[in-house]
Structure formats: structure tokens, C-alpha cells
Image (tube, rainbow, N blue to C red):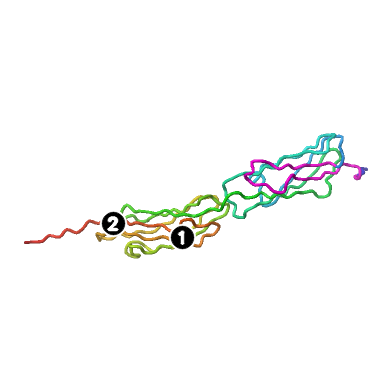
């Protein structure tokens, strides 16, 4: 019968409870025995929390406390990425799943919580101007770009308004909500352009972005320039 009062007990600690994802360094997870064991003790770790092992931080190996020693360590290394996490800081929970060797036992329930601090700024939206080659272009395609990608879907409203161009005559009124999927860097939408037979100067319409979610707007306005392709009418005067 094993006297569990005399066997080594394993505790788990971490060198710090938070680290920036771009720290360029690691934290140290330490398994500590209450007394030495005559053989190697293997401490198997499990992870949970909002941060994902292998994505937000490197994969963790088991900790081995060699015979005759009382401590063993493994490194916890955050992953620096350019993906903005809209939920900001994330936590990783590292716990002892099992202990084997040296008759050692876990000292109660052992776990540590580590916060990985987000270092990327939130994405900003901008929209490009478009100039059509002629009035016969069926659609003018606008691109809304992100300054950096995000871990969440981003939405933004868009709507057209008259400049020198007239809705219904030069272009079709267009409005809606654009969704840029998580991980993507841009999205597009179309504004239909209408052809006419009038010789006139190039005309413009305005496209405005508003009501962004999970992002800010750095450039909210685009100009659609519709290039006239009609020749001036030729009049003959008889004398």
C-alpha cells in the first residue's frame, strides 16, 4: 500500500503571468517536486483558454524532472503575428494533466493562467477612387481596404450621392453593407454606370463609408468619375 504522504508532490508555477505577443522572449513553466524521486518524473501538461496552443503560442512539451532533482522546466513562447485580435488580450490556461514515474502525484489541482498581450493596432478602412474608361462601363468596382487583417469579420455601410453626375441618368443609386471576412485584407462592391448620348464634361458621384464594426475608418470618401464618350453634334448651316 502506497503511503501518499511520503511520495513527491508536483506543483506548477510560471515565471510571469503576462507577456506581450511580440516580446521576442519566453516565460518559464516550472514543475517542482516536494521531494526528490528515485526515477524520472514526467509531468504531462494540458492547455485551455481563449489563446490557442500552436497558434497564439508554441506547442508545449511535457516537463521531465530527472531522478534526484526537484525541478523541471519548459518554455512558453507567444507567437507574434500581424493579425489584430478584436477581443484584445488572450489568456492561456496551462494545467497538469497527469504525472507518471517516481510514485509522484499532483499536488491537488495545479494550473497557471498566462495573459498574452495584443500588440497590433486595430485595422482602419479606406476606399479607392474610380475613373471609368467610358460611360459604357457597366459597373465601377470600388475596393475597401484594411490597414491590417483582423480575427473577426468587419462590416461597413456604403452609399452613393450626386456630385456633378445625376442618379438615374448617369449612375444607379447604390447602398448596402460590405462584409470583409476574418483574415481578409479587402472587399469590393459595384456601382452601375449608365450611358447616355449627350456630349458633356466628365461627371462625378461620391461614395461614402459609415458605421464600421470591428474597425475604424481612415478614408471615408471615394469619387466616381464617369468619363464622357460622346462626340459633340455637328451642325450644318446652309447659306
The answer to which quarter of the image holds residue 59 is top right
Viewer-side residue, 29 vs 100? 29
Give the class, few, some or many, for how many residues have Cα within 10 Å of label 2's Cα (few <14, many ≥20): many
The answer to which quarter of the image holds residue 78 is top right
Give the class, few, some or many, for how many residues have Cα within 10 Å of label 1's Cα (few <14, many ≥20): many
Number of numbered discs overlaid on the protein picture? 2
Tag on residue 224? none
Rendering coords of residue 77 (x, y %): 67, 42
Rendering coords of residue 193 (x, y %): 35, 59
| Label 1 vs label 2, nearer the camera | 1
Image quarter (top left, top right, bottom left or bottom right) of the C terminus:
bottom left
Secondary structure at badge 1 equals strand
Tell me: 68 left or right of 56. right
Work out how far the residue at label 1 is from the one at label 2, CA to CA, in angstroms. Answer: 26 Å
Tag on residue 209? 1
Rendering coords of residue 124 (x, y %): 51, 54
Tell me: 39 left or right of 182. right
Q: Which residues are magenta?
A: 4-33
Residue at x-position 65% and y-position 50% = 117
Viewer-side residue, 66 vs 25? 25
Image quarter (top left, top right, bottom left or bottom right) of the N terminus:
top right
Query: Mark 1 or mark 2: which comes first in sequence?
Result: 1
Tag on residue 228? 2
Amino acid at each position: 500500500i502506497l503511503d501518499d504522504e511520503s511520495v513527491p508532490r508536483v506543483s506548477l508555477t510560471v515565471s510571469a503571468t503576462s507577456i506581450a505577443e511580440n516580446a521576442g522572449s519566453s516565460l518559464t513553466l516550472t514543475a517542482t517536486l516536494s521531494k526528490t524521486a528515485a526515477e524520472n518524473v514526467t509531468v504531462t501538461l494540458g492547455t485551455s483558454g481563449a489563446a490557442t496552443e500552436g497558434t497564439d503560442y508554441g506547442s508545449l512539451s511535457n516537463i521531465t524532472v530527472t531522478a534526484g532533482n526537484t525541478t523541471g522546466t519548459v518554455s512558453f513562447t507567444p507567437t507574434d503575428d500581424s493579425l489584430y485580435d478584436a477581443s484584445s488580450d488572450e489568456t492561456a490556461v496551462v494545467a497538469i494533466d497527469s504525472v507518471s514515474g517516481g510514485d509522484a502525484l499532483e499536488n491537488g489541482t495545479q494550473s497557471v493562467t498566462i495573459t498574452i498581450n495584443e500588440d497590433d493596432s486595430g485595422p482602419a478602412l479606406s476606399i479607392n477612387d474610380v475613373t471609368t474608361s467610358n460611360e459604357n462601363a457597366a459597373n465601377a468596382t470600388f475596393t475597401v481596404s484594411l490597414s491590417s487583417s483582423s480575427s473577426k469579420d468587419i462590416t461597413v455601410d456604403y452609399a452613393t450621392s450626386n456630385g456633378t453626375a445625376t442618379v438615374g441618368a448617369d449612375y444607379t443609386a447604390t447602398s448596402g453593407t460590405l462584409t470583409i471576412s476574418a483574415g481578409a485584407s479587402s472587399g469590393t462592391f459595384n456601382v452601375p454606370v449608365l450611358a447616355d448620348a449627350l456630349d458633356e464634361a466628365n461627371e462625378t458621384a461620391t461614395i461614402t463609408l459609415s458605421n464600421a464594426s470591428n474597425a475604424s475608418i481612415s478614408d471615408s470618401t471615394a469619387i466616381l468619375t464617369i468619363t464622357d464618350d460622346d462626340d459633340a453634334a455637328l451642325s450644318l448651316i446652309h447659306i
